[in-house]
Amino acid sequence: MMKTLILSSLLLCCALPAVAQHDIYALNARGEVVADSAFIDPFVWINPTVEYEPLYSRTLFTPGLSGSYTVKLYRYKNSENDGGYFSIVEIDCGSKQVLRMIQTDGWDKFDPDYSPTSDYYKLVRLDDSTYALLFVGFNYASEPGLLTIVILRGGQATLVYNKGRHITSLTENPLKIHTISQFLEAVPESTHASLYEVIYQDGNLLKWRKGQ
């Protein structure tokens, strides 16, 4: 009996890391977003001298946030035949620029289900003072493009997630995003279980776990 209990306890301890959850970001004592660098891969910017042109600009409808946020998107000049629709994202709050992101491979329109869309991003309300802004990168060959998540809160825009992930499903209220880190058809079936991850809302925080 004792051996059975010990074995059961060991198996449970071994299983815990596989289902462990992690905060993608935290809020400090002033309520500011503190990102975890483990969830942010660096952007690749190969041609910093290439000229770019404006593609899109819109002020977001975000009740409850201090100040008005504006998203500005730019593409490289003469890049109509390149992958992605835009390569530069700027976010202003009022008259102040609070975030700028650049990647050569570009972001795509926000259509994870491959449905026709004119949306360049998705805005999701987490609570009265916190919003998540989601972008998806352009898929190249068998590799998913970046899933990029920015948190708008307190007059700031904070990059909290940037990984090569493909969204397989997304629901809101609360936000829950199922992703895979590689396309299943490109890797052995024996590895499929390890590719699934979930990003999910817990109040005004986003958390991450492995699995479906």
Image: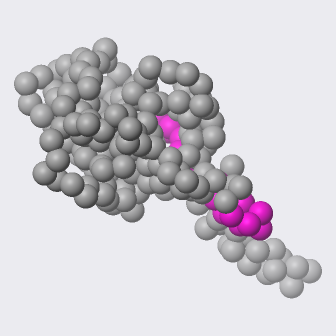
Residue 79 appears at what percent x and percent y?
Answer: 30, 38
Q: Residue at x 61, y 67 (%)?
A: 17
Q: Please, which residue is most extreme toward the bottom here?
A: 3
Say whether residue 32 is visible: no
Residue 210 shown left or right of residue 111 in the figure:
right
Quarter holding residue 91: top left
Residue 127 appears at what percent x and percent y?
Answer: 40, 26
Tell me if residue 182 is in the magenta stretch: no
Count how many numbered circles sit on residues in the image: 0
Quarter holding residue 211: bottom right
Residue 169 appears at what percent x and percent y?
Answer: 63, 36
Quarter holding residue 5: bottom right
Q: Residue at x 25, y 47 (%)?
A: 102
Q: Quadrant of the N terminus?
A: bottom right
Tell me which segment is drawn in magenta: 187-203
Looking at the image, is 2 positioned above or below residue 17?
below
Looking at the image, is 111 positioned above or below residue 41?
above
Tell me if residue 188 is in the magenta stretch: yes
Say whether residue 109 is visible: yes
